[in-house]
Image (cartoon, grey):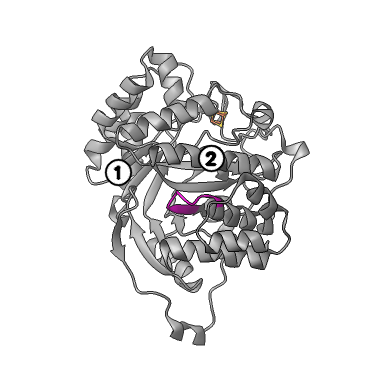
Amino acid sequence: MQEIDDKVKAGERLSRQDGEDLYATDDLAWLGELAHHKRTEMNGDVTLFNINRHLNLTNVCSASCAYCSFQRKPGETDAYTMRLEEAVRLAKEMEPSGITELHIVNGLHPTLPWRYYPRSISALKEALPNVTIKAFTATEIQWFEKISGLPASDILDELMAAGLESLTGGGAEIFDWEIRKQIVDHACHWEDWSRIHRLAHGKGMKTPSTMLYGHIEEPRHRVDHVMRLRELQDETGGFAVFIPLRYQHDFHDSKDGKVRNRIQPVTTMATGAEALKTFAVSRLMFDNVPHVKNFWVMHGLTTAQLSLSYGADDLDGSVVEYKITHDADGFGTPTTMTRDDLLELIRDAGFTPAERNTRYEIVKTFDGPDRTRRDVPQPVWS
Ligand code: SF4
């Protein structure tokens, strides 16, 4: 612990072994202090947030990933695919709240033609010209290669011409093949995921990176995952943020009552302590990725708030109708947070909020914590 502490304070890069040793410690307070040191060094006391909307154009998917509760097969009761007009209408509903980003991910629809996707981006961009479109996982881009016959480079060019400004970070899950082959059913693995993000970075995009943790993987697989991304970041510098995503164990009893998460019998879910540890180790290992984000929908608001003292410096966001894990979670977390809710959450944790755009440029700054509010009873977050 002392050696690692010294390395972090001296600004030295941590090794794979250091990462595994950090996961092995039970001293959560020390780990938090160390991660907070790194976070403060990199980002001061600022906590970023953005005002965004999540859209899932279709939940119909050709793949059957074992952990996924979102997928539907054609003909299932609540399978849906949005017409472009519906997608535009839903996006426009959020316009008055000042969204700066639309975040779009979808199932791998078996029969929708490739043209549907650039057309969707064009229609949304035309309707909301001041909103950044962040869309599609590397898995979807690889799927578009399959259904269009085009190489990923041409696909990205066409989507960018239609208005796409960033990919999303999903589809990464856990890259280690022994784990991956048990939970992932689509064909996009480390080689393709990294190829597609490398291409996007080469075209000037900043993209997010993610990791799905807390299922059947072990801490060493998380460290391996981070090491691969860190190496790619050394090469391209294109990742703006790393996002640990907590696997959702509880299936939501959806309309048809089916359990789609096939690993549920052998999983639980990361505890709050394990979640904080994962944020802290990620912050400490990633000396070359500027931000670590907590997607609060997957962690609950309490853990999200605490994670700000364990390395996280970014909260996503004013999410609306996030279906992918809301179809799975048992937290009863709200489906939306307003700007004021986020400001309150961040200040209450002792940080200074700042609104960012998709490229992590600060678009608005706010006052820091209001010490006088300690005199009145605090709201209780769920
Ligand atoms: S995780 Fe994505 S690719 Fe896998 S089944 Fe779910 S929607 Fe399909």
SS under mark 1: strand
**Residue shown at 49% from the left, 25% from the top:** 192
- Tell me which amino acid carries mark 2: Ile
Q: Where is residue 64 shown, x and y percent of the image? A: 61, 25
Q: Quadrant of residue 281?
A: bottom right
Please identify the residue farthest to the right as the structure is shown.
Answer: 266
Ligand 1 placement by image quarter: top right
* Position in image of residue 218 (x %, y %): 71, 42
Q: Nearer the viewer, mark 2 or mark 1?
A: 1
Q: Nearer the viewer, residue 297 or 178?
A: 178
Distance between the alpha carbons at the discs numbered 2 and 1: 21 Å
- Read off the magenta span: 285-293
Of 345 and 15, nearer the camera is 15
Residue at mark 2: 324
x and y percentages locating residue 62 in the rendered image: 54, 21
Q: State the image quarter where residue 92 is shown.
A: top left
Q: Is mark 2 within 8 Å of ligand 1?
A: yes
* Left or right: where 374 falls relative to 352: right
Q: Is residue 162 above or below residue 113?
A: below
In the picture of the structure, the residue carrying the numbered disc 1 is 132
**Residue at 33% across, 43% down:** 91
- The answer to whether residue 375 is seen in the rendering is yes
Where is residue 325? Give x, y as percent. 56, 43
The answer to whether any part of residue 302 appears in the image is no
Q: Is mark 1 within 8 Å of ligand 1?
A: no
Number of callouts: 2
**Element type at mark 2:** helix
Residue 35: numbered disc? none
